[in-house]
């Protein structure tokens, strides 16, 4: 059974810490090595299109309080230049304040991995720094134009280097022929180790210019399929009708037998 924390939002610091405590996350974080916090910074638009820098700071502070592992923030933006987007959304100021590294996955050193069982990405250029890192997916809860919802798993598109997957935008090649299958395949190469979802204000209708909807929640879980299942329900969708979820069920996690713990 997968456990998902669903916590009422008061502020990022208290609500994220409470959600992670409900999961017993402090005991499951790596003691050493590298933790990468992966927000959704698809472009320079403010939240809820993108992840609030305050949410990233709250996750950082929780990790810092419970582990000696190195902590960094990493993203490869969907459009524009990642460094510019880090700056526009306050992440450079955060990095300066906390003394942490900002990683641009679009320009990172990569290695080529192969998976003959992948649905369409049988080879994948992955940033070397991601492979052994403990990745915390930190998305906003949003509808999406192609996959219906974009939550913990779709957020992993950011690790795909734009150098290899760009077209009309930095990740364009991942959206053809099937965005849903790309979600499944990227998570075959690297799925989130932990996910924290900002559902304080969701974005409905469209992932870049939708309608904000106040839900007042934070979700967290170690099973990204379970996280995305509950998140999709909160957005009003039937998860059983979302292709990326049904293809991931039993592979990256589970859609059924989910225990929701609240606070």
Image (cartoon, rainbow, N blue to C red):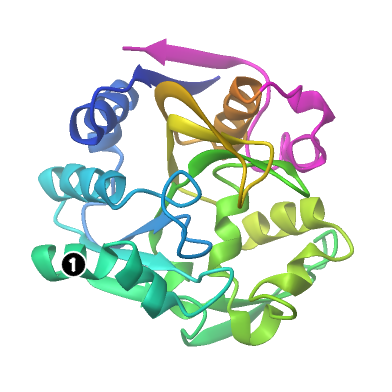
Residue at x 83%, y 28% (from the top left corner): 241
Q: Would you name the residue on which mark 1 appears? A: 93
Q: Residue at x 24, y 73 (%)?
A: 101
* Residue bounds of the magenta highlight: 236-263
Is 249 contained in the magenta span?
A: yes
For mark 1, give the secondary structure.
helix
Q: Nearer the viewer, residue 245 or 29?
A: 245
Q: Is residue 29 above or below residue 221?
A: below
Choose between 165 and 223: the one closer to the eye: 165
Viewer-nearest residue: 40 or 262: 40
The total of numbered circles placed on residues is: 1
Q: What quarter of the picture does the N terminus occupy?
A: top right
10 Å crowding of disc 1: few (<14), some (14-19), many (20+)? some
- The reply to whether residue 190 is in sight is no
Going by the image, does 130 lie left or right of 7?
right
Residue most toward the right? 177
In the image, is 185 to the left or to the right of 104?
right
Quarter residue 257 falls in: top right
Where does the image place residue 55, in percent across and percent down from the top left? 30, 44
**Residue positioned 80% across, 61% down in the render:** 118
Q: Is residue 199 magenta?
A: no
Figure quadrant of the C terminus: top left
List x then y, in percent, for residue 246.
79, 35
* Residue appearing at x 23%, y 31% in the figure: 17
Is residue 122 visible to us here? yes
Query: In which quadrant of the rendered view does residue 225 lie?
Result: top right
Residue 72 pos. (x, y %): 28, 65
Position of residue 191 relative to residue 166, above or below, is above
- Image height of 228 relative to 120, above or below: above
Instruction: Tell me where residue 62 sits by quadrant.
Output: top left
Residue 232 place in picture, x, y as percent: 65, 28
């Amino acid at each position: 059974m997968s456990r998902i924390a669903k916590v009422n939002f008061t502020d990022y610091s208290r609500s994220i810490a409470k959600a992670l405590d409900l999961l017993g996350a402090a005991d499951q974080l790596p003691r050493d090595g590298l933790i990468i916090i992966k927000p959704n910074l698809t472009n320079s638009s403010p939240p809820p299109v993108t992840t609030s820098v305050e949410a990233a700071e709250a996750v950082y502070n929780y990790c810092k309080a419970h582990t000696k592992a190195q902590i960094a923030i990493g993203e490869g933006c969907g459009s524009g230049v990642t460094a510019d987007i880090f700056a526009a959304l306050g992440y450079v100021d955060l990095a300066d304040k906390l003394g942490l590294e900002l990683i641009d996955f679009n320009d990172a050193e990569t290695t080529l991995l192969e998976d003959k069982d992948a649905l369409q990405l049988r080879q994948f250029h992955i940033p070397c720094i991601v492979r052994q890192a403990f990745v915390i997916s930190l998305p906003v809860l949003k509808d999406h134009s192609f996959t219906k919802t974009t939550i913990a798993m779709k957020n992993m598109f950011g690790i795909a280097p734009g150098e290899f997957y760009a077209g009309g935008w930095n990740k364009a090649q991942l959206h053809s022929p099937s965005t849903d299958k790309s979600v499944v395949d990227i998570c075959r190469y690297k799925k989130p180790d932990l996910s924290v979802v900002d559902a304080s204000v969701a974005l409905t209708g469209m992932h870049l210019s939708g309608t904000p909807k106040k839900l007042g929640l934070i979700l967290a879980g170690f099973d990204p399929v379970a996280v995305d299942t509950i998140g999709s329900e909160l957005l009003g969708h039937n998860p059983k009708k979302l292709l990326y979820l049904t293809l991931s069920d039993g592979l990256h996690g589970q859609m059924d037998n989910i225990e929701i713990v609240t606070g």
